[in-house]
């Protein structure tokens, strides 16, 4: 009887902890972005991760080069960094610039000067959540945690106590300065990705990896 009570109490605590973990932050149409007035609510199936976007009709094949600006760290009051340190923001911003530049180079030639065949990509880091130390890893070895994470993986949701990254992408015609595409998004690892649970920023960095791949697919 005592063991059953302890098991019930433990399970209840795990459920409560997981519910608090999955609440997280949700990206907004950040008011200090250059494209904020053009962002519209996304009503497509990916709205949970990318709630706001703008897209002009563009024949992407006309572009063969891309300029990737240094990543800006968002300073607006509606940022979603929580208690993330400035040094951690700088680490993520540097990682984001390198990752997006490397990934975009698989589709475009990297450039430094504007031209009619060149895109300009502006990235703004707007928020991040660290993976909760110890608990974030323990959830992958706990029965209830594994069950929850398994369901989240199927749904495309975030794992219990996992970190994430939020950012804005703005894509311009480099010659005219015309906005071609913009969106804000939140990215994170698959909920069953065990390696991404180790290291406070690993999940956010994995989210950046996924986001870079997703942008290239949009520009094909």
Image (cartoon, helix red, strand yellow):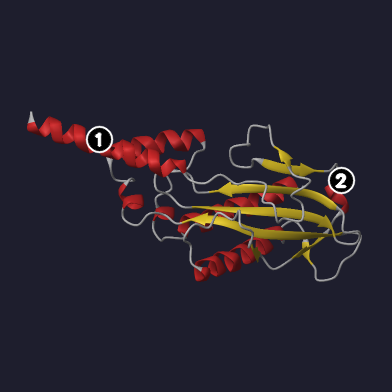
**Label at residue 151:** none
Left/right placement of residue 8 relative to residue 33 reads left
According to the image, label 1 marks what residue?
11
Q: Residue at x 43, y 48 (%)?
A: 193
Quarter of the N terminus within the rendering:
top left
Tell me what residue is drawn at x 69 percent, y 59 percent: 123
The span from disc 1 to disc 2 (Cα, nearest Å) is: 53 Å
Counting from the top left corner in percent of width and height, residue 72 is at 66, 65
The reply, left or right, for residue 142 in relation to residue 54 is left
What residue is at 87 percent from the left and 54 percent from the top? 178
SS state under label 1: helix
Q: Give residue 82's position: percent from left, percent from top.
A: 49, 57
The residue where tag 2 is placed is 59
Residue 43 in which image quadrant: top right
Could you say where residue 13 lies in the image, as x and y percent from the top left?
26, 39
- Where is 177 relative to 7, above or below? below
Residue 48 vs residue 195, the one in the foreground: 48
Count of marks, rendered view: 2
């Amino acid at each position: 009887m005592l063991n059953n009570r302890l098991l019930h109490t433990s399970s209840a605590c795990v459920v409560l902890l997981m519910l608090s973990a999955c609440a997280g932050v949700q990206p907004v149409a950040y008011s200090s972005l250059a494209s904020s007035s053009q962002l519209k609510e996304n009503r497509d199936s990916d709205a949970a991760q990318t709630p706001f976007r703008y897209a002009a009709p563009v024949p992407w094949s006309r572009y063969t080069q891309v300029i990737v600006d240094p990543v800006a760290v968002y300073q607006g009051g509606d940022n979603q960094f929580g208690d993330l340190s400035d040094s951690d923001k700088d680490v993520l911003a540097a990682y984001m610039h390198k990752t997006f530049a490397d990934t975009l180079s698989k589709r475009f030639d990297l450039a430094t000067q504007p031209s009619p065949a060149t895109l300009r990509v502006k990235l703004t880091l707007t928020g991040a959540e660290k993976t909760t130390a110890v608990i974030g890893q323990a959830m992958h070895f706990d029965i209830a945690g594994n069950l929850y994470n398994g369901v989240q993986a199927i749904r495309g949701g975030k794992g219990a106590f996992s970190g994430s990254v939020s950012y804005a992408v703005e894509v311009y015609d480099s010659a005219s300065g015309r906005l071609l595409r913009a969106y804000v998004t939140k990215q994170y690892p698959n909920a069953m990705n065990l390696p991404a649970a180790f290291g406070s920023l690993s999940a956010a960095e994995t989210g950046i990896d996924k986001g870079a791949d997703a942008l290239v697919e949009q520009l094909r």
